[in-house]
Amino acid sequence: MKILYFAWVRERIGLPSEELENRSGTVRDLIEDLRAREVRYAAAFADLSALRVAVDQQLTDFDASIEGASEVAFFPPMTGG
Amino acid sequence: MHILVQQAAFDMGAQVNDFTSAQDASGAVVTFTGIVRDLPQGGLQHMLIEHYPGMTEKALTEIAHQARTRWALDDVLVIHRYGMLIPGETIMMVATASAHRKNAFEAADFLMDYLKSRAPFWKKEITSATADWVGAKQADEQALNRW
């Protein structure tokens, strides 16, 4: 499973993407695991209201399942246009 | 329907001419262009636009498709750049073609509202002293409720 980070989430974690073992559960479960890893992850995921998530390139919410997903991306609210 | 996500600059006039001349059933073409604006206090050196390759194209296609299901459009064009841009440069454009102007105007407005908040782009403003990610505005999110 590929995890991607964009904008200040990428900067805070210090990585554009990384590979994790496939897992079940929800986005929220994944975030709990990431938070527990290191301070930089805890800092990036401190305030979920400032974050958005896409599973397999579809915008979704933190309760979405990641079972069978190949990509999960975390980023701040988008500023296109 | 044409969706282009690119680093390179584009010639807005040429794009509008090509788009317009390809329409034979349309009586109206509406275009919008977004350009890099200096900060209110000045001093913007450049803007960095990051995007999510793959999802960006999908999201733009989905937004354009929604516009086509809601309004009687003959064609839609979306061009959005990423990378480093300086003040005055063109960031993006949309064009809509329809038999009548109302559909073309409303669809262009809808496309812009959705592009702002639902297309995975992020802007960073760089001055000689600062480098700040542009925050999403509450008003941009609320604008989606109009539709």
Image: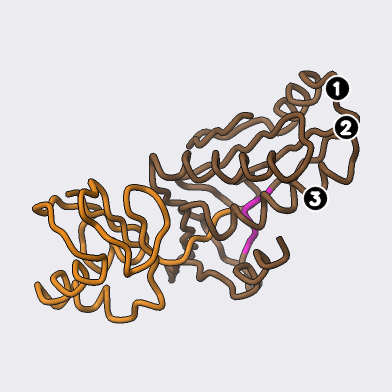
The amino acid sitting under disc 1 is Ala
Left or right of B36? Residue A12 is: left
The residue labelled by disc 3 is B106
Q: Which chain is orange?
A: A
The residue labelled by disc 1 is B25
Q: Residue furthest bottom?
A: A46
Q: CA distance from mark 2 to mark 1?
A: 6 Å
Residue B37 sits in which quadrant?
bottom right
Residue drawn at x 32%, y 61% is A74
Return the mark for residue B4: none
The amino acid sitting under disc 3 is Glu
What color is chain B drawn in? brown
| Residue A66 position within the rendered picture, expressed as x and y whole percent measured from the top left | 24, 57
Can you say whether B14 is above or below B88 in the image?
A: above
Residue B75 sits in which quadrant?
top right
Main SS, magenta region, reads loop
The residue labelled by disc 2 is B99
Residue contact between numbered discs 2 and 1, judged by CB atoms under 8 Å? yes
Q: CA distance from mark 1 to mark 3?
A: 18 Å
The amino acid sitting under disc 2 is Ala
Can you say whether A38 is above or below A6 in the image?
A: below
Query: Which residues lie in the magenta part?
Result: B34-38
Residue contact between numbered discs 3 and 2, judged by CB atoms under 8 Å? no
